[in-house]
Amino acid sequence: MEIETREEEEAAVTLIQLRYLITIAETNSLNKAAEQLYVSQPSLTSAMKELEKELGIILFYRSGRGVTLTNDGTEFLLYAKQIYSQYESVMEKYGKGEARKKKFGVSTQHYSFAVKAFVEMAKEFDMSKYEFAIRETRTAEVIRDVSTMKSEIGVLYLCDFNRKSMEKLLKSSSLEFHHLIDCQAYVYIWKNHPLAKEKSICFEQLEGYPCLSFEQGDNSSFYFAEEILSTNEYSQVIRANDRATMLNLMVGLNGYTLCSGIICEELNGSDYIAVPFRDDEQNPNSIMEIGYIVRKNTILSKMGELYIDKLKRYLKVT
């Protein structure tokens, strides 16, 4: 009986050490971490030294400016987050839980439906007890956020053009893609655009208008483009960082973007429409396979399960 009790205590200490490590990494400060964890700094320092001794590696560089992770520490932090996240998910389902706030984050390409699903999910929780985060961001950052467990779920798309490269990247990042829905390309424009009354729009008709594209960074691969048909030759291109700017450019410059056609009017407003893109031999259409990514072998939290459910409901996925 004494052996079992000792093993349980050692397991509990290990989980506490992981929690301490994660908090220090988030704050980059032993003082701030100690305040958040309600422990003394000497106790926190001692726990980290014990963990370093147990692992046989140095986790942090310590200086007057605070602490920073070593290369070994950065690598181990990923495992620590994964283990502690799984522990929290199990305790959420089967245990009494803890008083501290639970965290849940989603990173997504610029999809209003992904934000809408997040809103509907958050409404079902007492937000004073949770720390929620929704990040509309670049494709590479969606992948990085989920890979490093900054976010539990990522939302993005695959197509014939980017599939091979994206699947290779997801695999190397220990991520798996889950299909939600297939969509064809639509031209997204202001309701008073000269082409707004067209039943469908071909590439030639768009020649005189600027193509709007979400910026992916200076050296980003074109496989990261959020817009379908990104390999086409466009005479005018304007890049933006956020959805609000994109909408303003549609009104101010009669710009357009090529999208999935899944638009949330509640968030984007009713001043914009999606017109089917009409392909031809030179500009064939392509299927957008929209889905979500998670780390492999991950048990979704209660928030994660509900978020996926809200996504499927909005997209009418059975």
Image: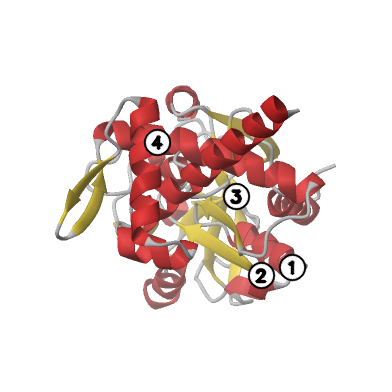
Q: Nearer the viewer, mark 3 or mark 2?
A: 2
Above or below, 114 against 280 in this view is below
- Residue 189 lies, with reference to residue 71, above or below; the image says below
Mark 1 touches mark 2? (CB < 8 Å)? yes
For label 1, the residue is 125
Q: Is residue 250 visible?
A: yes
- Quadrant containing the C terminus in the rendered view: top right
2 or 4: mark nearer the eye: 4
Per the model, the C-alpha gap separating discs 1 and 4 is 35 Å
Q: State if disc 1 and disc 3 touch (CB < 8 Å).
A: no
Quick one: label 3 or label 2, which is nearer the N terminus? 2
- Residue 139 coordinates in the image, percent (x, y): 43, 45
For disc 3, the marked residue is 260
Q: Secondary structure at mark 1?
A: loop
Q: Callout 4, which amino acid? A: Leu
**CA separation in Å, label 3 and label 2:** 35 Å
